[in-house]
Image (cartoon, helix red, strand yellow):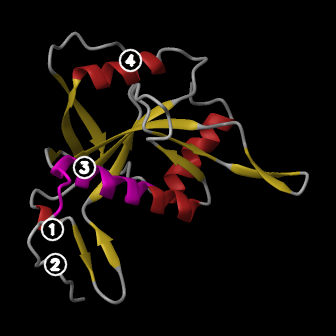
Amino acid sequence: MSTEQPKSPDVSNLTQGHKMESLSRAYIQAVAGQAGLNVRIAPKAEFDYGVDGTFQFVKSYQNKLVESGHPIDFQVKATTNWRINNNEITYAMEVAAYNKIADRSSDNTAIPMILLLFCMPEKPEDWIAQDGEQLLLRKCCYWYRITGELSDNTSSVTIRIPISQILTPTAIVELLQQVRRREMV
């Protein structure tokens, strides 16, 4: 497979962070589309309070498609600052963002929430590759359910995500089925 890398100078005014966010959105949208799910990705809400999007099944009701009513919310982090150690992705997450998800998870009446971590190569020129047959987004997006106590740390919390928790259509469908069965509270 030959891949063409961007050769033109960067003339965009987008920040690296915005480019990373855009690619993470594309990844999530593609996975949700393949799974046949409805996905909302911010900025649909007027304000950002830590929820970047929602996955939801769609069902047929009176010959019309409607949302199932069993959603799972997510927060997305796109990063080049990740490592693989002992079959786990390690990532230093800002404690404020971590605690928002942990606090939500402690409320068993709340809509469940997961972290989506899009792990990207260090060099921006390695983020995508394409040819006449395919478009590749590199490296991988993982999902993680933060549960437990809030952190007392002052700046970051190191999270460890099993490398098996890749964001795939099958994984998201299984997570939504857990929500539907009320196994994820």
**Residue position marked by numbered label 4 in the rendering:** 148
SS at mark 1 in the image: helix
Q: Residue at x 25, y 61 (%)?
A: 139
The CA distance from mark 1 to mark 3 is: 16 Å
Say if residue 120 shows up in the picture.
yes
Q: Amino acid at mark 2?
A: Gln
Q: Which residues are magenta?
A: 12-28
> Can residue 23 be found in the magenta stretch?
yes
Q: Nearer the viewer, mark 1 or mark 4?
A: 1
Q: Secondary structure at mark 2?
A: loop
From the viewer's perspective, is 143 left or right of 169? left
- In the rendered image, residue 84, in percent from the top left (x then y), is placed at 17, 48
Front residue (pair 17, 86)? 17
Residue that mark 2 sits on:
5
Amino acid type, callout 3: His
Which is more N-terminal, label 4 or label 3? 3
- Determine whether the residue tagged by mark 3 lies in a helix, strand or loop: helix
Which is nearer the N-term, disc 3 or disc 2?
A: 2
Q: Is residue 138 left or right of residue 66?
A: left
| Nearest to viewer (mark 3 / mark 4) | 3
Q: Earlier in the sequence, mark 1 or mark 4?
A: 1
Farthest top residue in view: 152
* Magenta span includes 108: no
Spatial CA distance of label 3 from label 2 is 19 Å
Q: Is residue 11 above or below residue 57?
A: below
> Where is mark 3, residue-wise?
18
Identify the residue position indicated by label 1 in the image: 126
* Amino acid at dot 1: Asp
Q: Nearer the viewer, mark 1 or mark 3?
A: 3
Give the amino acid type for the residue marked by disc 4 in the picture. Gly
- Look at the picture and state if 129 lies above or below 31: below
Measured in 3D between alpha carbons, the distance from the residue under mark 1 to the one under mark 4, in whole angstroms, is: 36 Å
